[in-house]
Image: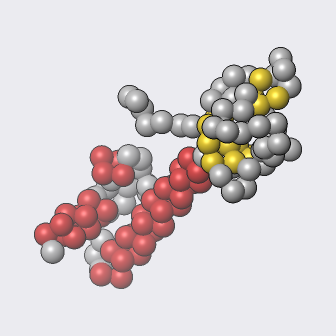
Amino acid sequence: MGLLKVAIDRLLTTDPAGWLGHKLTEPQDPMPETIGEAMDMIRTNAKMAIDSATEQLQAELAKHRWISVGERLPEHERKVLVTDGRYFWTDRYQYDKDRWENLIPGGGDNVEYTHWRPIILPEGE
Protein backbone atom coordinates (compact mmCIF):
# COMPACT_ATOMS: atom_id res chain seq x y z
CA MET A 1 0.00 0.00 0.00
CA GLY A 2 2.94 2.34 0.64
CA LEU A 3 4.02 2.16 -3.00
CA LEU A 4 0.55 3.16 -4.18
CA LYS A 5 0.57 6.18 -1.87
CA VAL A 6 3.98 7.24 -3.22
CA ALA A 7 2.73 6.90 -6.82
CA ILE A 8 -0.44 8.89 -6.12
CA ASP A 9 1.52 11.54 -4.21
CA ARG A 10 3.87 11.94 -7.17
CA LEU A 11 0.99 12.19 -9.62
CA LEU A 12 -0.62 14.87 -7.49
CA THR A 13 2.44 17.08 -7.19
CA THR A 14 2.71 20.17 -9.35
CA ASP A 15 5.78 18.86 -11.21
CA PRO A 16 5.67 15.14 -11.96
CA ALA A 17 8.58 15.49 -14.40
CA GLY A 18 10.99 13.68 -12.11
CA TRP A 19 8.79 10.60 -12.12
CA LEU A 20 7.43 10.40 -15.66
CA GLY A 21 10.15 12.23 -17.52
CA HIS A 22 8.02 15.11 -18.76
CA LYS A 23 5.45 17.53 -17.44
CA LEU A 24 1.98 16.09 -17.96
CA THR A 25 -0.23 19.00 -16.89
CA GLU A 26 0.20 22.65 -16.10
CA PRO A 27 0.81 23.29 -12.39
CA GLN A 28 -2.40 23.60 -10.42
CA ASP A 29 -3.16 23.87 -6.73
CA PRO A 30 -0.63 21.77 -4.81
CA MET A 31 -3.34 19.38 -3.66
CA PRO A 32 -6.84 18.92 -5.01
CA GLU A 33 -9.57 19.84 -2.58
CA THR A 34 -11.84 16.86 -3.19
CA ILE A 35 -11.42 13.18 -3.93
CA GLY A 36 -13.23 13.79 -7.24
CA GLU A 37 -10.69 16.44 -8.25
CA ALA A 38 -7.84 14.12 -7.26
CA MET A 39 -9.31 11.28 -9.32
CA ASP A 40 -9.76 13.59 -12.33
CA MET A 41 -6.14 14.70 -12.05
CA ILE A 42 -4.96 11.09 -11.75
CA ARG A 43 -7.05 10.05 -14.77
CA THR A 44 -5.75 12.95 -16.87
CA ASN A 45 -2.12 12.29 -15.96
CA ALA A 46 -2.48 8.54 -16.43
CA LYS A 47 -4.11 8.96 -19.85
CA MET A 48 -1.37 11.32 -21.00
CA ALA A 49 1.35 8.96 -19.72
CA ILE A 50 -0.29 5.96 -21.43
CA ASP A 51 -0.71 7.88 -24.70
CA SER A 52 2.94 8.95 -24.62
CA ALA A 53 4.15 5.42 -23.83
CA THR A 54 1.93 3.99 -26.58
CA GLU A 55 3.42 6.36 -29.17
CA GLN A 56 6.94 5.43 -28.09
CA LEU A 57 6.12 1.72 -28.23
CA GLN A 58 4.58 2.01 -31.70
CA ALA A 59 7.68 3.84 -32.95
CA GLU A 60 9.91 1.11 -31.50
CA LEU A 61 7.77 -1.68 -32.96
CA ALA A 62 7.94 -0.06 -36.40
CA LYS A 63 11.73 -0.49 -36.30
CA HIS A 64 11.32 -4.25 -35.83
CA ARG A 65 8.52 -5.03 -38.29
CA TRP A 66 8.78 -7.59 -41.08
CA ILE A 67 9.27 -5.88 -44.45
CA SER A 68 8.14 -7.51 -47.67
CA VAL A 69 10.94 -7.98 -50.21
CA GLY A 70 8.47 -6.50 -52.70
CA GLU A 71 8.27 -3.31 -50.64
CA ARG A 72 12.01 -2.76 -50.39
CA LEU A 73 15.30 -4.54 -49.79
CA PRO A 74 17.79 -3.94 -46.99
CA GLU A 75 20.93 -1.86 -47.31
CA HIS A 76 23.77 -3.44 -49.32
CA GLU A 77 25.58 -6.18 -47.36
CA ARG A 78 23.63 -5.45 -44.16
CA LYS A 79 22.96 -8.69 -42.28
CA VAL A 80 19.22 -9.06 -41.63
CA LEU A 81 16.79 -11.72 -40.48
CA VAL A 82 14.97 -13.22 -43.47
CA THR A 83 12.17 -15.73 -43.98
CA ASP A 84 10.62 -17.76 -46.73
CA GLY A 85 7.40 -17.94 -44.71
CA ARG A 86 8.44 -21.19 -43.09
CA TYR A 87 12.02 -20.84 -41.82
CA PHE A 88 14.10 -17.93 -40.47
CA TRP A 89 17.80 -17.25 -40.95
CA THR A 90 20.22 -14.37 -41.40
CA ASP A 91 21.37 -13.19 -44.79
CA ARG A 92 22.65 -10.18 -46.75
CA TYR A 93 21.41 -8.67 -50.01
CA GLN A 94 24.12 -8.04 -52.58
CA TYR A 95 23.10 -5.20 -54.88
CA ASP A 96 26.17 -5.59 -57.07
CA LYS A 97 25.05 -9.17 -57.84
CA ASP A 98 21.31 -8.41 -57.55
CA ARG A 99 20.73 -11.37 -55.25
CA TRP A 100 20.76 -12.60 -51.66
CA GLU A 101 24.04 -14.00 -50.43
CA ASN A 102 22.10 -17.15 -49.44
CA LEU A 103 23.60 -17.96 -46.06
CA ILE A 104 21.02 -20.69 -45.36
CA PRO A 105 22.78 -23.99 -44.76
CA GLY A 106 22.00 -26.37 -47.60
CA GLY A 107 20.00 -23.64 -49.30
CA GLY A 108 20.14 -23.15 -52.98
CA ASP A 109 18.92 -20.83 -55.62
CA ASN A 110 15.38 -22.13 -55.16
CA VAL A 111 14.81 -20.40 -51.78
CA GLU A 112 12.02 -17.83 -52.09
CA TYR A 113 12.60 -14.90 -49.74
CA THR A 114 9.34 -13.24 -48.70
CA HIS A 115 10.23 -10.85 -45.85
CA TRP A 116 13.16 -9.45 -43.92
CA ARG A 117 13.67 -7.34 -40.84
CA PRO A 118 16.61 -5.52 -39.31
CA ILE A 119 18.62 -7.14 -36.57
CA ILE A 120 18.64 -4.59 -33.77
CA LEU A 121 20.67 -5.53 -30.73
CA PRO A 122 20.36 -3.84 -27.34
CA GLU A 123 22.87 -1.04 -26.83
CA GLY A 124 26.27 -2.25 -25.68
CA GLU A 125 26.16 -5.56 -27.57
Q: Position of residue 92 (x, y in %)?
A: 69, 29
Quick one: 113 or 48, which is closer to the camera? 113
Residue 123 visible from this viewpoint: yes
Residue 75 visible from this viewpoint: no
The quadrant in which residue 70 appears is: top right
Residue at 48% across, 62% down: 50
Colouring style: secondary structure
Judge left or right: residue 119 versus residue 29.
right
Judged from this view, the residue extending furthest toward the front is: 106
Assign the C terminus to one quadrant of the image.
top left
Residue at 66% across, 32% down: 103
Compared to 43, does 98 lie above or below?
A: above
Q: Position of residue 113 (x, y in %)?
A: 78, 44
Q: Position of residue 101 (x, y in %)?
A: 73, 28
Quick one: 113 or 12, which is closer to the camera? 113
Judge left or right: residue 36 versus residue 50.
left
Quick one: 34 or 74, which is closer to the camera? 74
Assign the N terminus to one quadrant of the image.
bottom left
Residue at 36% across, 52% down: 20
Judge left or right: residue 51 versus residue 105.
left
